[in-house]
């Protein structure tokens, strides 16, 4: 089922923030809970993940209310991120189909900037991100199986 969520980037304190939000909303993490960078398989041509990043949060999702979820990741400076107000949140779209994901991605990235091209990811989803022509950050994650 298609859904929309808000994706938050943190400079290394995602787990603390999401445990706090969990206590506030009285809900539990979705799926398998907290996914860590240690679960990222080696990438061709990329150096191994630094030891200090292995326990950082790669992904976490928490339903908060009214069918809306917040999701988050650690995005420390040492990984090339510069967290600032305005670049620390995305609107995350999870369409039902890859075709709809591509349509939305193409439309929202037109006149803007592609951050991560749409591509099949190791966790099994079609994923990509962009900034639209108005500076709004969008993330796409479609789990449709072929």
Image (cartoon, rainbow, N blue to C red):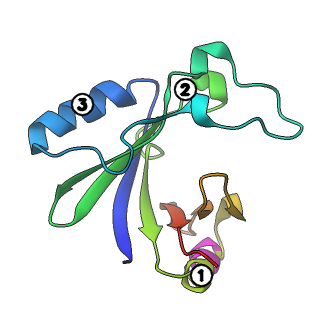
Residue 80 percent coordinates (x, y): 66, 30
Q: State the residue lying farthest toward the top.
A: 52
Helix, strand or loop status at disc 3: helix
Identify the mark at residue 107; answer none if there is no mark.
1
Helix, strand or loop status at disc 1: helix
Name the residue at 21% across, 44% down.
28
Up the image or down, 123 lies above or below 26; here it is below
Measure the C-alpha gap from mark 3 to mark 2.
Answer: 19 Å
Name the residue at 49% across, 34% down.
83
Q: What stretch is highlighted in magenta?
A: 105-109
Identify the mark at residue 32; answer none if there is no mark.
none
Residue closest to the eye, 22 or 122: 122
Residue 146 percent coordinates (x, y): 64, 79
Q: Earlier in the sequence, mark 3 or mark 1?
A: 3
Q: Which of marks 3 and 2 is nearer the N terminus?
A: 3
Measure the C-alpha gap from mark 3 to mark 1.
Answer: 35 Å
Identify the mark at residue 76; answer none if there is no mark.
2
On screen, residue 88 versus residue 129, left or right, reads: left
Circle 1 packing at 10 Å, graded few (<14), some (14-19), many (20+), is few
Residue 122 percent coordinates (x, y): 66, 52
């Amino acid at each position: 089922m298609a859904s929309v969520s808000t994706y938050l980037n943190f400079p290394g304190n995602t787990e603390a923030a999401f445990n706090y939000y969990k206590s506030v909303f009285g809900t539990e993490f979705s799926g398998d809970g907290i996914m860590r960078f240690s679960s990222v398989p080696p990438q061709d041509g990329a150096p191994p993940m630094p030891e200090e990043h292995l326990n950082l949060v790669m992904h976490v999702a928490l339903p908060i209310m009214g069918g809306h979820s917040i999701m988050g990741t650690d995005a420390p400076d040492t990984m090339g991120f510069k967290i600032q107000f305005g670049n620390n949140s995305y609107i995350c779209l999870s369409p039902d189909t890859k075709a709809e994901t591509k349509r939305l991605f193409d439309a929202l990235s037109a006149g803007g900037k592609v951050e991560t091209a749409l591509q099949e990811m190791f966790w099994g989803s079609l994923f990509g991100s962009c900034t639209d022509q108005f500076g709004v950050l969008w993330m796409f994650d479609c789990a449709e199986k072929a």
